[in-house]
Image (cartoon, rainbow, N blue to C red):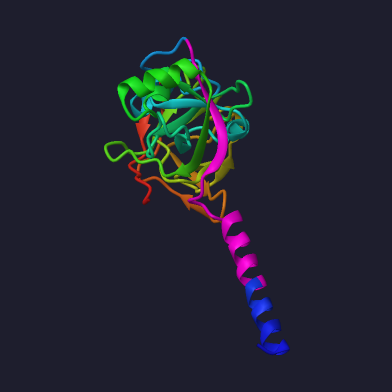
Amino acid sequence: MDLSLKLVAFLLACLFLRKTQIDASTCSDCFTQSRAAYYSSSDEKGTETGACEFGSFGATINGGDVSAASDLYRDGVGCGACYQVRCTNAKYCSDKGVTVVITDSGSSDHTDFILTNHTFSKMGQTTDAGASLLALGVVDIQYRRVSCSYPTHNITIKIDENSNYPHYLAFVIWYQQGNKDITAVQLCETQNFSCKLLDRSHGAVWTISPPPTGELSIRMLLSGSDDGDETWVVPVNNIPQEWKAGATYDTGVQVAL
């Protein structure tokens, strides 16, 4: 091979390596290496007092397959996100692992996830393997963001019990779907289309004081963490004019996966 052909081959090899590195760094389906532990006091469910402020919903969503997260909590932006988590010990762990929903904030021994013990054991190939994982306490894992899917539930608005009609409105969003984050929320008066941007006060709680009046239309900004894509979603159903603290309102929306 003459010098010019060698140079071409070298350049092509460099371009291929660079493309492979870029693809790896932007791969939305790739797994990240980490560690996971479990709540030693948990059983079948999560906690009703998680930092996301989901309450009893946060304990039972996804059949109780929930997790606290450290960096992935992201000051509440990560609340409601779904992840596939699988341990890496070939002796005990299944290839599929489990899908968990982030409902709380926490870390233990340099972990990204703290699962319920019921969920932690489900990473095992068998019931006995799951028991062996529990005995280990903390395990090496791989994880990746996946879409949340609730085919029997639309996105739902849960009015916080501390809301005070008509002066102060706070709510959380249940059954977040897809694999994008809810990064902004607006409330609009349906009569004059005047909109106000809400604050994320803590966890998954959105607040406004005073809220717009009349029947309210909600708008949610869904943002992709990898591709930067943003989409405003406007629910079919509105929040009624005389909304009530503690009430839930079905938005009528299913996010296409």
Whether residue 115 is situated above or below residue 250 in the rendered picture: above
Q: Let me know if residue 205 is in the magenta part.
A: no
- Establish if 36 lies above or below 77: above
Percent of width and height locating residue 36: 53, 27
| Vertical arrangement, residue 82 with respect to residue 170, above or below | below
Q: How many marks?
A: 0
Residue 189 seen anywhere in this rendered image of the structure: no
Asked if the magenta segment contains residue 39, the reply would be yes
Q: Quadrant of residue 217?
A: top left
Query: Which of 186/72 is in front?
Result: 72
Q: Is residue 188 visible?
A: yes
Q: Position of residue 40 (x, y in %)?
A: 48, 12
Examine the image and state in which quarter residue 116 appears.
Answer: top left
Q: Residue furthest top?
A: 41
Residue furthest to the left: 152
Left or right of 57: which side holds 229?
right
Pick the residue in front: 146 or 61.
146
Bounds of the magenta span?
14-40
Kindly identify the residue that appears in the image at 49 percent across and 46 percent down.
180
Indicate the position of residue 124 as horizontal and vertical percent values: 37, 28
Q: Is residue 189 left or right of residue 127?
A: right
Q: Could you tell me which quadrant the N terminus lies in?
A: bottom right
Foreground: 23 or 137? 137
Seen at 55% across and 24% down, the residue is 168
In the figure, 40 relative to 152: above or below?
Answer: above
| Image location (x, y in percent) of residue 39 | 49, 16
Please give the name of the residue rendered at 59% of the width and 41% of the height, measured from the top-left corner: 197
Q: State the residue in front, 188 or 107.
A: 107
The answer to whether residue 227 is left or right of residue 118 is right
